[in-house]
Amino acid sequence: MLTINEIASAIDSHIRTGLKGVSNFSYSIEMLEREVTIERNRILESVHKKPGFEIAPFYQTVNGLKADWGSISKLPVSLQTTTEEQVLHFQLPSPLTTMKDRSVGYIGSPLRDSDGWKAYFDDSYKKHMYKRYTSHRPFVYIHPVPDVSNGLYDAYVLNYSGNLKLISMDYVMENPEDIYDFMLTDEQMKFPAPEWCVEEIIRRLTMKYMSLYRQSHAPTQPNNQTDNVA
């Protein structure tokens, strides 16, 4: 697996090889890195519902998310049993909310001594609440809009009465770079995408930029047409 910088550098190399003679490239490696993430998310959203699709290579693991007992003010009304109720609460960076619960592989104890809790981003949690065999099981509601004060997403654990202080997650992050705020090392991470996806990202972005530059550097065609005179 490659880092995002290595992927962007490979795209840059492909573009320059394919556009020999062009010297005034206006993009930066940082710009390409941002486009790599956007393209990965676009690819993922288009294929994740296909039968047999393996999503695990896109997950990132975040350990040590601090949990507290917080207000339920951001929960849907149907989850607010009383205005005084406190529920286990934590915040997480940039989940890919467009994929909803499909974006989450694991939420639970850092010990991973169970299968973890089911995650919901919308009112599909109602199925969990009202089915006899799941109605008493813990589940997590993730508020689909980030906290304006820090850009993190609020998550609430319902049907839970334990005393966890830390939460671990495996999930798809909208911006994989956000994980650096929760890492204990500055080591460059490998970009969370399998080889086939990285190859497709490189292909798409190489073709995109080559097409743009060819259009912008195409020679102007002289207008040799003359008006017909009656």
Image (cartoon, rainbow, N blue to C red):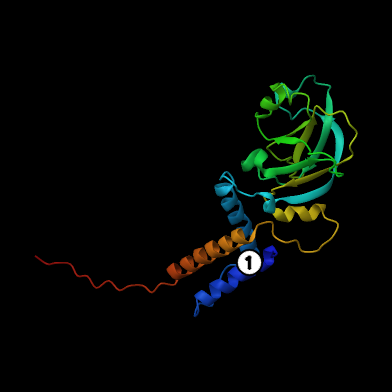
Q: Amino acid at mark 1?
A: Ala
Visible residue check, residue 95: yes
Relative side of 52 to 90, left or right: left
**Residue 119 pos. (x, y %):** 72, 36
Name the image quarter holding residue 107: top right
Q: Nearer the viewer, residue 160 or 67?
A: 160
Residue 187, above or below 162: below
In what element is the residue under mark 1?
helix
Q: Which residue is mark 1?
A: 8
Q: Residue at x 68, y 37 (%)?
A: 144
Residue 217, above or below 172: below
In the orientation shown, which residue stands out farthest toward the bottom? 21
Residue 74, above or below 208: above
Query: For mark 1, does the 10 Å Cα neighbourhood hold few (<14), some (14 to 19), or many (20 or more) residues?
Result: many
**Residue 77 pos. (x, y %):** 71, 23
In the orientation shown, which residue stands out farthest toward the top? 82
Relative side of 15 to 191, left or right: left
Q: Quadrant of the N terminus?
A: bottom right
Visible residue check, residue 24: no
Q: How many marks?
A: 1
In the orientation shown, which residue stands out farthest toward the front? 52
Q: Residue at x 69, y 50 (%)?
A: 56
Relative side of 179 to 6, left or right: right
Residue 52, above or below 145: below
Q: Residue at x 69, y 56 (%)?
A: 192
**Residue 49 pos. (x, y %):** 57, 43
Q: Quadrant of the C terminus?
A: bottom left
Name the image quarter holding residue 16: bottom right
**Residue 172 pos. (x, y %):** 69, 48
Relative side of 77 to 197, left or right: right
Q: Nearer the viewer, residue 8 or 136?
A: 136
